Amino acid sequence: MSDTSAAAAEAAQDAIIDEFSFFGDWTERYQYLIDLGRKLAPFREEWKTEANKVHGCQSQVWLVASGDANRLEFAATSDSAIVTGLIALLLRVYSGRSAQAIVATEPRFVDSIGLAKHLSPTRSNGLAAMLQTVKQHARNALNG
């Protein structure tokens, strides 16, 4: 189970890297990120609680997890359009995967598409905080 889940996470990263390679400059890439964020499933208002807030982000970010160690699903949103786009990328890689695959998958797409260089320090910290939260949910699921 986790082998296919990990392979799917890697395939999602490859697809993201391919998509971003089509854009010549960062203005286009930021626009694409914003567009990806707009396509996320609606985030329910009742999920916007302190318990679901991701700390370490400059903008407001809420993230909820459901499922178990075999398959974790994530939903998230932000009050920032670019951060919501980052969430869309993270969910593509990590949502719907086994907890084992989530813990094992490093977000190589961040460096590969140049995000690490083009995000402000506060957004980079926020992305790291979101990733940490996703991986913590997976570790919690593994520990029962």
Image (cartoon, helix red, strand yellow):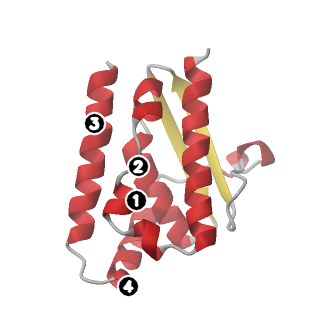
Seen in the picture, residue 121 relative to 13 is either above or below; the reply is below
- The label shown at residue 107 is 2
Quarter of the figure with residue 78: bottom right
- The span from disc 1 to disc 4 (Cα, nearest Å) is 17 Å
Q: Report the Cα–Cα distance between label 1 and label 3.
A: 17 Å
- The amino acid type, in three-letter code, at marker 3 is Ala
Mark-to-mark CA distance, 4 and 3: 29 Å
Q: Is residue 73 shown above or below 20?
A: above
Residue at (62% x, 14% y) in the render: 144
The residue that disc 1 covers is 110
**Place of residue 34 in the rendered image (x, y in percent of width and height, measured from the top left):** 44, 72
Q: Nearer the viewer, mark 1 or mark 3?
A: 1
* Comes first in the chain, label 1 or label 3: 3
In this view, 73 is above or below 47 = above
Q: Which residue is mark 4?
A: 27
- Amino acid found under the numbered disc labelled 2: Pro
